[in-house]
Every structure is written in C-alpha cells, then in structure tokens.
Image: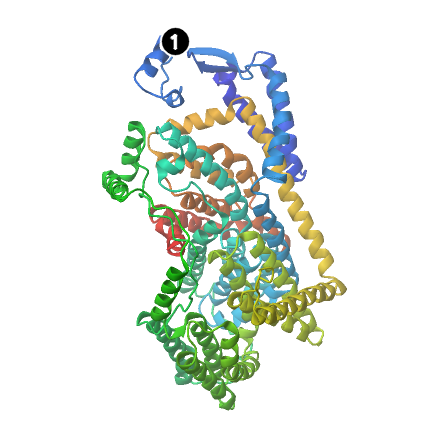
Amino acid sequence: MLFGLDGVEIGLIIVFLTLFSAILSGFPVAFAIGGAGIISFGIIAALDSAGLLIHQAIDTGSDAYNALLATGIPAEKISLFRNPDLPRLAEPVFVRGWEYALDRNLSFIVNRINERVIAGQSIETLLAVLMFVLMGIVLERSKIANDLLTTMARVFGPLPGGLAVSIVVVGAFLAASTGIVGATVVTMGLLALPTMLRNNYSPELATGVIAASGTLGQIIPPSIVIVLLGTLAGDLYSAAQETRAVEAGCTDALTYLGQPAVVSVGTLFQAALVPGIMLAGLYAAYAFGYAMLNPSKAPAVAMGVKTGEPVTRSEAFTWYLGVPVALIVGAILGAQVGLVGDQSTRIDSFTDVGRSASLRTNVPELCQASMIELHGQEAWDAAISEQTDIDSSGGVQESRRLSEEEIVDLRAQKVAAAAPIGTGIMILTVMMGLILAFARGVSPASDPVPLMIGAGGLALGLAVDTLFLTPLSTPGVTVIFMAIPWALALYGCKHSFGRLSKNELLRVVFPPLVLIVAVLGSILGGITNPTPAAALGAAGAIMLAAYRKLAEEDRSPKVILMSTLSVVVMILFGINFDLRINTSSVSFESWVAFFFAYAAYLYALFGLFFSCWVLFKAGVLSPAVRETAKVTSMVFTILVASQLLNLVVISFGGEHYIQQFLKSFDDVRTVFLIVMLVLFVLGFVLDFLEIIYIVVPIVGPVIYGAHFDPKWVTIMIAVNLQTSFLTPPFGFALFYLRGVAPKEVTTGHIYRGVIPFVLIQVIGLAILWFFPSIVTIIPDLMSN
C-alpha cells in the first residue's frame, strides 16, 4: 500500500487536493469542480493501473465472515471499521478496471443531469432559485438598502451600539427580501462602514457586524441555500428512510414510520424562520453588550433631525399599543365565544374515508419489533386497539356519495352553528382598524373626522353582517349590503395612507414589508409552493423598484399603485366568488365577478409590463436580468459539475468507504456531530455550493437515514453552511467587504472582527442542538 494508506483513502485525498488546487487556480468554480473530477480520475486511474493503489476489502468467502452472517448480523452492517479482525483481500480500487468505471460514469452523468437538473422532480423547485435571485438583484438595484440604513440608524443610533444594531436589523430585513449575500455586504459596507468609522466605532465591530449581518440571507427565508439544500434533502431523506425500513424488516418507509418520508422546501422555510431570527437577535445582543462594555468603541450617535409631528407619550401608548391590542384581543375573544367564526356552508358530495389505525399492524414479526422499538410499546398497543375497533365495526368505511336529503340536513346544521360575524370580515375590520389607529398616532393633531368616518364604517359593517347577512347570503348580496360600510371605511383608509406616508419609518419599511409578507406568507401558510411564491416576489420587486424610480423622477406612480390594488381585488374575488365559467350552470353574479377579476388581472399584467418598461428605460432591468442569468447559470453549472465529481468518488468506492466509516459508530448523534465538524472545517476552504453538491450527497444517506427529524438536520446544516461565509481565510463575505472597505481598514481588522460572530454561529448551533424544538415549532403549529 502506498504510504501505508488504503487505496480508497489515497483516492479521496487526491480528489480533495485536486479540487482545492482547482479552486485556488482562479478558474470559475463551476469549471474548477468539473475539471477537478476529470483530473483526479485520471491520476487515480494511472496509479491504479500501476498497481500502487491497493484496497483492503473484506474476504466475503472466509469462515469468519460467514460466521458473522450466521449470527443474524446483516451484510450491510459488516465493515472493516466495525470488524477490523476479519480476513482481507487486496484488490485494485477499480475492480473491473478504470475503463469500465469511465464508461459507467459517462453513461450515468447523462442520467443524473436529466434527473436532477433538466427534467427531474426537483426542477420546478430549482426554478425558484432564478426567481429569488431576480427578486434580490432588482431590490438591491432599487437602492432599498440605502433608505433602510438611513432610517434604522435614526431609530437605533441614539442607543449604545445603535449603529451596529441597525446594521443587524437591516441585514435581517434584506435577508428576507433579497437574500443576496454579496450585494448586501457590499451595499452595507459602502454606506454604513464609513459612517461607523467617522463616529469612532471600532473597526473590528463595524466590519464584523456588517459581514455577519450580510450572511443572514443564507438562513432567513426565502433563502437560496435552503432551496438548493431542500431539493437535495428531500431525495436523500426519502431514499434513506426506505433503506432503513427495509433493514428493519418492513416493506416501506410509510409502514415503518407511520407517515410519509417527505420533507419539502416550504416546510424548511417554516423551520428556518425562528433560527434565523434567533441568530439576528444574538448578533444584536453582542453588539449592544460590546457597546455597554466598551462605550468609547461603539458610542451612541444621533443621526439627523427627527422628522414628523411630535407625539406625546399618552398618545403613542393609546394609538400604537392600546387600540391595536384592543382590536386584536377583541377579535380573538369574539372567536372564543362564538361571535366570530367560519360561515361556510360548503358540503362535500362524498363522505370522508373512515379512520384507519395510526400504525399499520399487519406486518411481519421483525417489522413489528422494529416499529415497537421506534414508536414505543404504548403507541403499538394503541394502534392494535384502533385496528380491533375498526375490524369489529366492519373495516374501514369507504367514501360514498351523499343523498340530497343528507346534504340539505348537513347544510342546515352548518347554518345553525355558524357565527354571526364571518372570519374574513373580522380580519378586514381589524386590518383597516389598525391602519386608522396608526394614522391617528402618526398625526394626532390632524383633523380626526375622516378617521372617525372610517371607524364608523367598520362598526356599521360589523352591524350589517350581524343583522342582515346570513351564511346562505351569496357573495353578490354581501357586496351590495356592505358597499356603504366599506366605502366609509375606505374613505378613512385613504386619508390614513396620506398621513402614514409622511412618517419616514413607515414609508421606507412598509412597501418591502408587504412584499416579504406576501412571499413568505404564501409559502409558510401552505397557500403555494416556493416557485410561484418566488415568481410573485420577482414581479413585486420589479413593481416596487419601478415605483421608487418614478418617485425619484417626480413622476406619478399611480399606474403601479392601481396595479397593486388590482392584485388585491383579483385575490378577493377569487376567494369569495366561484369564478369557474366552464360549468353547466353559471350564475349572473359569477359572470360579473369573473369579468371584474379578469379586468383586474389584465390591469395588473399591464402594470407589470409598465414597470418593466420604466426599469428598462432607466437602465436597471437589463443589468439585473444579465446578473440573474449569470448567477443562475453558475448555480446550475456547479450542480452539473458536482454530479461529475460525485460519480468519480463513487467509481473508486470513496462514497461507500466514507459511509461505512460513519455507520461504524453506534451513536447516531456522534455521527452527526462528526459530520457537522467536517462541514465546519470544510467551510474554511470551500463555498456552500461545493459543500451542498459534493459533500452532502456522500454523508446524506447516513444522517438522513437515522431517527433525526429531517427538518432539524437540514437547518443545522444550513446554519453551518452560513458560517462558511465568515470563516477566514476564504469566507466570501470577507472578500466582499475587503473590496469596498476604506484603506484604514485592514484585513486583520476584518478577520478579528468576524471571530466573535463565528463563535456566535457555534453558540447558535449548540442551542439548536440541545433545543431542536426551536426548529420544529412553526412547522408543527402550521401542520395543526
């Protein structure tokens, strides 16, 4: 054996050194990865042909090996790591020769590209990458970060370390709206770093907080890292759990787990929300604590003159806290006592399928023992009891069509149980009430009559809904009865928006906040999957950027505002009316609603095209599209190149060797800890894309094949990968910041500045390790 190492070990070293050298060569990463795969395969093939690479494999024909099989140990659990005393055979790393391996790789690479890049199940989700990149680049070029930094500095500047805290807040905000690390770090470095240095902030704190806050886009949804990692994790988890179920003696993962072995990108977005906010909170807490201990290095700074109408403490308490809390609590209490609730009278034409047992009980003995070990004896006994009750009642009841009498009876029961006020009307009332309250708080000295008219309209609307509308009222009748109350409420809201627009904080934060809520809300709420939500975000970003461009040029943005209103109208009509016109009987009000909704759709589409034209004429759209194409092409090219490198590792047994090593540990938490340490170390020299597409597919079958929650595993990996942007010497955020930092800021300042934030990342990982419910709390709540 060469250097006393196994041939597979030498092959892995060759692959890593070749990859590392290719990345350092200065070639684009996508081509460096593919080239590293080709060159490393050639080197390994040459050494193997020369007889220098010898792999020590288990002699499967030996008596000792057969004796282990006779004891009931599965063949897949026997390895040289677990059983080092087994007889061995010396064989080349390419057992059938490198020519066969090359032919196999060439045939497999076509299938892999087709399955995972061009036409696989994950291609629709991968399209979200393009949309999110376009959304981020357009927002970045609309200079939204400039206004956010200025506004937040005025809000937090007077506090100790306030400028640093404002950087964290803006970083989190940009993470949820753009998610582009490079653009965020460069923008904040250009705008905020000189200001912080002029106000005697420590260069280490200033550079550290900018670099760290810029990386929040890697974990706070919508995160490109989670999209890429999620598409891979879904396949790895499903395949690994199927293998685990077969090893447990069961037919499939659904039988063994009692639930489908799936994990979606949307669910991962839900899981990443709290950890992302937690990390931002830790960054802000460190900045504030640093300022308290070193006040001269992070002083309080008053940024600009406070604008807006003066508001007393009692007025602020009343309109910013008292009234909003009263509205929200009142709505919740109304729902609790049955005053507010669902008024739907929709009845399905078929009955539900009868309840089945929580676990499948008609399984072989080996599978039964494995399921009891996994779920516990109590859960198994409960499933047996449920199945016994089902069998005694004649088995699982099949779905059947309801008769007309049954449908009428069920509808009458729903009408009798319906709440006086509908949930939708109460939500609209609370939202418009909050707008009126905040407008009063922003300008308490202004004429209150328009706001009082709006509030009267809201109260009248609740009275009309309670007294005159029933669950059987059609949407058209509801619109007629609510026309006057809503007109009064909208009159008040129109005046409210005029007053709210005079508040700098609301004027700057509200538009991108609406976009974030629309994109994330549609994903987190389960309304749609990430790809349509990303398309909505890209369209919204284009319209928002065009709105800002028109405002800069003192041109009327009325077309864009009306287009936004058209989208709202279209959504409201779609929710409340039956817009299906291809059925046998269509009511008059459905036709009217359809034409109104279609007109709103056409105007919204016109507004989008108009926004594109505005940005195109301003020279914003073309560079944004080119940059989007460049970034997206890089991601997909890296995906293709990584498939080639993975096949090289598989061809000489490297993937199997690593997985056997990891499976040799009895404690799966130890295995996952080793994987996390390896990913952390690789983050010093590799980018997150290389780690996702090269390393994760190798270790994924082991860690996703354990009993861990796949959401927790994926988010732990994502937080670890976020650290790769900060770890010297090759952290990308450090390079971005170094490129725009003033001359007096040295590379040493930047490296020393990020060290505390790397430690915070480690602390964040430790918190998630010991408290995994932080990751699963929102997905669990949403599923219920």
Q: Say which amino acid is labelled 1.
A: Ser
Q: Is residue 195 above or below residue 447?
A: above
Left or right of residue 134, residue 718 in this image: left
Residue under the image location 66 percent in, 61 percent down: 141
Q: Is residue 75 above or below residue 20?
A: above
Q: Is residue 300 above or below residue 283?
A: below
Residue under the image location 48 percent in, 81 percent down: 436
Q: Label 1: how many residues lie within 10 Å, few (<14), some (14-19) or many (20+)? A: few
Q: Is residue 488 above or below residue 29?
A: below
Left or right of residue 209, residue 415 in this image: left
Instruction: Say which of 92 and 256 sits in front.
Output: 256
Residue 685 visible in the picture: no
Left or right of residue 278, residue 550 in this image: right
Instruction: Say which of 363 and 226 sits in front.
Output: 363
Task: Say which quadrant the C terminus sits in.
Answer: bottom left
Relative image position of residue 42 (x, y in whole percent): 64, 22
Residue 104 visible in the picture: yes
Q: Which residue is mark 1?
A: 62
Number of numbered discs visible in the structure rendering: 1
Instruction: Say which of 157 and 709 sits in front.
Output: 709
Relative image position of residue 223 (x, y in whole percent): 53, 52
Rendering quarter of residue 280: bottom left
Relative image position of residue 257 (x, y in whole percent): 36, 39
Residue under the image location 52 percent in, 69 percent down: 152
- Secondary structure beneath dot 1 equals loop
Relative image position of residue 598 (x, y in whole percent): 64, 67
Query: Residue extending furthest right?
Result: 617
Instruction: Say which of 630 and 383 sits in front.
Output: 383
